[in-house]
Amino acid sequence: MSNSYGKIFRITTFGESHGPAVGVIVDGCPAGLEISPEEIQHALDRRRPGQSNITTPRQEEDRVTILSGIFEGKTQGVPIALVVNNKDQASKDYAHIEHAFRPSHADYTYTAKYGTRDYRGGGRSSARETVARVAAGALAAKLLQQQGITVQAYVSQVGSIKLHKPYDELDLSQIDSNKVRCPDVETAASMISLIEDARDSLDTIGGVVSCVVKGVPAGLGEPVFDKLHAELGKAMLSINAVKGFEYGSGFEGVKMRGSEHNDQFYTDEAGNVRTRTNYSGGIQGGISNGQDIYFNVAFKPVATILQPQQTINDAGEEITLQGKGRHDPCVLPRAVPIVDAMAALVLADFLLRQQVNRI
């Protein structure tokens, strides 16, 4: 039922926005991986609501409980169960949409598919589900760190305000130095002002999260249908509000000729195979080539706005609907750790698959 992801490092998420809890079962994580509750909690703290005045004011501590699979700080090679209780639901804020189809939400499509839906915060379609992904992503990230692989996502665009510097000219250690998670002080300030303006106008705004993965060895990925970039694209497009994915030169690459775009190989002083440019984004033929992997993820404006909109109800009657409750004016700051988590989950799975391929 599409609630699971991964072939070897496999996760299954469960829970709804206004249910008792959300959580994840992680199966296939190797035994002996050292991981503390604090490391998982740190990832969740970056995603949790109520962080600043440009995120939803919903107050959730998102405290993780480890139910199984980790003993004395090490994974045991058995299924790992992680649960986060929901505590600050305000289900009454959604009573007015019990029979309404909110514009650009999943209300209608869930009803069309299942014949029923949980209207409280969108139920399973809510971004609250991503708590589970981030918790599992902390395990995947730790597994990657052991192999010298790092994943770093950051906000590179809000509305029309774009960070034009390439990632290798940025100090990525500054991603969390401001509330919008853009590693450039001046650009971050402009982004924050734009988000605040959207919030004050009872509106929302979208943008782009960029991600850089360093230290990936050559050889990860599969030919044909399980290409590495295809799986990264699937993982990113599975995140709520994502409308686009591009890697390497992306759509800008169509402006170039092959003589400009081709990444020429050479051998460095240490005998490693390298490329002089990296328009391929670290992936060729669906398999990593040892260069940095980089990609962009486009997020639409949050669909819930506090302005009146025209729509219909489940009886087909035209109605006027106005959003209520607590919502993000811009999803990007809290989307950064979700992109981190999904990228880590994809790469951890391919890392383990490559080990099987080499046996």
Image (cartoon, grey):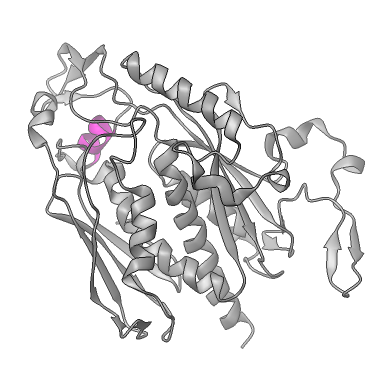
User: Residue 57 appears in which quarter of the rendering?
Assistant: top left
1 vs 224, left or right, is: left
Q: Main secondary structure of the magenta part?
A: helix
Span highlighted in magenta in the image: 106-113
User: Measured from the top left, where is residue 196 in percent x and y?
Assistant: 40, 22
User: Measured from the top left, where is residue 358 in percent x and y?
Assistant: 64, 84
User: Residue 17 appears in which quarter of the rendering?
Assistant: top left
238 and 202: which one is in front? 202
User: Measured from the top left, where is residue 284 in percent x and y?
Assistant: 73, 57
Which residue does the image show at 13% across and 42% down from the upper left?
A: 89
182 and 311: which one is in front? 182
Which residue does the image show at 24% across and 38% down from the upper left?
A: 110
* Figure quadrant of the N terminus: bottom left
Which residue does the image show at 32% across and 70% down from the upper left?
A: 37
User: Residue 224 appears in which quarter of the rendering?
Assistant: bottom right
Residue 273 belongs to the span the image colors magenta = no
